Image (cartoon, coloured by chain):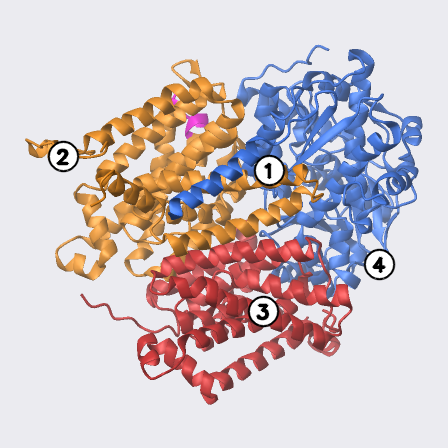
Chain colours: A red, B blue, C orange
Amino acid sequence: MSFFFEVLIGGLLAGVMYSLVALGFVLIYKASGVFNFAQGSMVLFAALTYVGMQEKFGFPFWLAFLVALAVMVLVGVLTERIVLRPLVNQPQISLFMATIGLAFFLEGLSQLIWGTDVHPLSLGITDEPIESLLTQFNIVVSKFDVAAAIVAGLLVAVLAVFFNRTRIGRALRAVADDHQAALAVGIPLKQIWAIVWSVAGFVALVAGLLWGARNGVQFALTFVALKALPVLILGGFESVAGAIVGGLIIGASEKLAEVYIGPHVGGGIEGWFAYVMALLFLLVRPEGLFGEKHIDRV
Amino acid sequence: MQIWKTSLVAIALLSAAVTASAQDPATQFVGITSYRVGPYGANGAAFFSGFVDYLALVNERDGGINKVKLSWEECETEYNNTKGVECYERLKAKAPNGPTAIHPMSTGITYSLLDKVAGDKVPLITLGYGRTDAVDGRVFPWVFPLESNYWDCATAIVKFMSDKEGGAASLKGKKIVVLYHDSAYGKEPHPVFEEEAKKLGFELKLIPVPHPGNEQQSQWLQIRQYQPDYVVLWGWGVMNATALKTAQKVGYPREKIIGNWWAGAETDTEAAEGAAKGYYAASLNLAGNDFPVVKDVEKYVVSKNKTGTDAKVVGNVLYNRGMSAAMMTVESVRTAQAKFGKKPLNGEQVRWGIEHLNLDVARLEKLGFGTMLPPIQVSCENHSGSGLVRFQQWDGKHWKAVSDWISGDRAMVRKMVEDGAAKYAAEKGIKPACLPG
Amino acid sequence: MFYREAGQFKTSYGADQALFPIRQDRIGLAVILALAFVAVPLLASQYLFNAILIPLLIFSLAAIGLNILTGYAGQLSLGSAAFMAVGAVAAYNFDLRVPGLPILISFVLGGLTAAAVGVAFGLPSLRIKGFYLAVATLAAQFFIPWLLVKVSWFSNHSSSGVISARPIAILGYAFDTPAKRYLLVLTIVALLALAAKNMVRSRIGRAWMAVRDMDVAAEVVGIRMLHTKLTAFAVSSFYCGVAGALYAFAYLGSVQPEDFNLDLSFRILFMIIVGGVGSILGSFLGAAFITLLPIVLDRALTAVALQYNLGFDSGVASMLQLVVFGALIIFFLVVEPQGLARLWQIGKEKLRLWPFPY
């Protein structure tokens, strides 16, 4: 039984890491209706910038973090200016494709600037089992994963406050609801979009640091976006809460499936299990767990 | 107007591309399908830096192979098969003699080129990767898995484990997990491990890791529950560092993990930081900067910044492997020159040279490689030439050799190679025979 | 002046409904086909065949397949590569296991197998729409290659799971040179492209477009949703499947399921976006653009680097190429969101009026 809990807890904690990436997708989709495929590349770009600042200039944590954040804000603003603004009112698929183009651009640029080496990244928390749990219950729970989950929880709390309590947050929600109505009451749409992309850049930075500390900062970081997509369909594209709950469900069920179903079918099912599960789930609820229901009219 | 501007730019680019300078016909042109970007860019960059640096060294120090200068060109494949084919075709057309020999450094590209090289008469050297049964040169005359192959590696790993336990009989009843990259590459050694398990009586569990392998919690929790005596790590790229870090996370001792030679480079262990200390890996060549040839490269090439190599990677496992790959190409050309004359050679002549390559201890010593490599003697029946593997351990800073050059059950591997090659020959309608030369 | 339909009178319904109603189009097509079938095989080098023309044609076919599904029927799919894999592996197995089966029949059977799998994965489209469906097709993209690797029967128990396709021979005639393989691929692609062109203006093609434009409205006017969406998936997957079989047999000569990854699916999607969504011609233009652009950029950058001795390695050139590629995609979407096919159309309109554009 302890093994079951071990897998479950590990899965839930891994799920939090997926949520973190999914969150970036949700923010942008909510405010601008863009399915931003470049989120994975933004994670790589942010993490590489942070590591680069530390390695090249020997910046301490907070300074490197601030510089990386500034760079991500710049990326966000430029994206709004160069990519999104000219594509206003285009079909969603065009915007989606534009973000794939952006993904290529960022992947190339980040490796051009910082090289293709694998950079170790240390946040000062080693990825080891917590002793007391290991000795008392024989359950392995990683210190690092717990810390990452706490960071992710804090991030969600901050975002929730930002969305619900601040003036900009309210403007964001208004934009998400109806672009034109928001424009009509005097909300500056362009600025709002730039802010959303900057916030998504911030989320990418946090995700990049945590994932980078887990696996080393390298090109493969862009693949974490693929782990976030089933989380999105399960949770719904428009819901922050959905990203969190979806992440927990996906994380836990994919680990349990790999451990308990995997050995019977040859293993390695993690790559697709989350997608198939999300697909089956969609058949029951086509707009995701917390997604908004759309009504089609002729 | 947009159309005109776009097409003008396109034409300008096209003409620049077409007028690219052709290679000097008086040199031995080496076409290099390399990759320095993409998911495995870090590994490729180290390998191909070593490769190019050795070619540059031959030119700078010796003035070429018997005064025949080398020229080369790299084409970026990004570890992608279609790009690899495009690069191969491009490099082949670059010089009248063809690209000397192609090192794809990718099992996938190797498979895509397998049929093409025979028709085009271009030797394909796959140093420690690619199609294993290509060792049988009677079926695959143009393919050379030099030094060693995955099956030799698998049986050598088993040998290494049994040596550590104290003899072959001691593996009986032990539990061994093979954690592998879920792809062609990862599946290749399964038959050998299964055969060894039957023969030596250990319990074998194969656990796949889905590509790219940046999330392995469930695999390692399975391992923790199973409590194996050893874990064999058959990974590539980000999977290796993640495996080591996840092993630390679930508290599995790294001294019990043994990687193959694509899981044992500095890029893997450095990314895993402290988690890699104590980890073993097989190797085709030793790491280190103390070999005379590495010193020469530092002196003639790297310090003069001839190739733009990052001095940091010099002496790395993969850098040295790249140098040895280049050395084998150069020495094959030298061997062939003894027969065909001291001039730039074509693919057929180079192929003869590879098939008659003989690098004994004295020769390796003279070339400055010393103990970095095992002696290699290639023949038509055996396109591999050595099959010897050495084991290294990561001490937190460097790879240190912990074994001699060893090999496992070579006879068993040989039989499997011949069976595999015969099956391929039957499927494709090939009559096995040595090429005359 | 040259491209004017004035004076071409249609005297029958048949003439009015012809595939290419304008005479100049017919002549143009005949010239292009003649060039492709006669001039190119005589002039092209081996590099051109193996590295450019054959993959270009094969990707055009896959792009037509995706264009039928996404451009005409409006169902966004990110799984085209997986269906190519099904076609490739199925064709290999039919060729290997049914002795004496003509290779062309194997290709068709490969396509049909892909169509069947496509229908299975198309079923959710009845309930799911838009990006949700796109992400759902990713399930196919990840599941199918996994299955092909896991079940070793598919690869005839090869130890690595890689398939080596057998040489192509039709009625004892071996297609053993790149030029011959090119002609074979060209013939198949040309026939299937004409069939597609024909299909999209037929009853079923119009039903697809109705569903794309407004599925609720289409259902109201009596178009069977189940039938229409599933035929779109079937036909699209058939095209992708045949493209996959050609990819295995005529291009690479080997199949690794991992080859047919998400990246390839994206590339095919790029082709139809850049070429033109909902256009057969656009599929060709897009495939040409996406296949050639990286090669041209790579060669140009390498050449420039050599010329001016910039001293950067192929890796830097490749990353620059990635940057330029990404930027160009965005540029294209901004400047001409309807793709190259639209540019071609504008050109035609201009030609119609030329030299008196009033």
For label 3, the residue is A72
Residue C317 point in image, percent of width and height: 63, 45
| Pointer 4 local density, CA inside 10 Å: few below 14, some 14–19, many at least 20 | some
Quadrant in the picture for the N terminus of chain C: top left
Among the 4 quarters of the image, the one containing residue A181? bottom left
Specify which label sits upstream in the sequence, 4 or 1. Answer: 1
Tag 3 near tag 2, CB within 8 Å: no
Q: Nearer the viewer, residue C303 or B370?
A: C303
Q: Which residue is at 32% across, 61% downward?
A: C128
Label 3 SS: helix
In magenta stretch: residue C4: no
Question: In the rendered structure, the residue with mark 4 lies on which chain?
Answer: B
Q: Is residue B435 left or right of residue B389?
A: left
Which amino acid type corresponds to the residue marked 3 in the rendered image?
Met
Mark 4–mark 1 distance (CA, rounded to whole Å): 32 Å
**From the viewer's perspective, is the residue at label 3 or at label 4 nearer?**
3
Q: Amino acid at mark 2?
A: Ala
For label 4, the residue is B396
Tell which residue pokes out farthest to the top in this image: B436
**Label 1 amino acid?**
Gly
Badge 4 amino acid: Gly
Q: What is the distance, in whole Å, between disc 2 and disc 1 at their CAs?
A: 56 Å
Residue C239 appears left or right of B172: left
Task: Look at the image and give the residue range highlighted in magenta.
Answer: C94-102
Mark 2 near mark 4, Cβ–Cβ under 8 Å?
A: no
Give the foreground label among 2 and 1. 2
Front residue of this view, candidates C282 and B203: C282
Which residue position is annotated with label 2? C6
State the residue position of label 1. B108
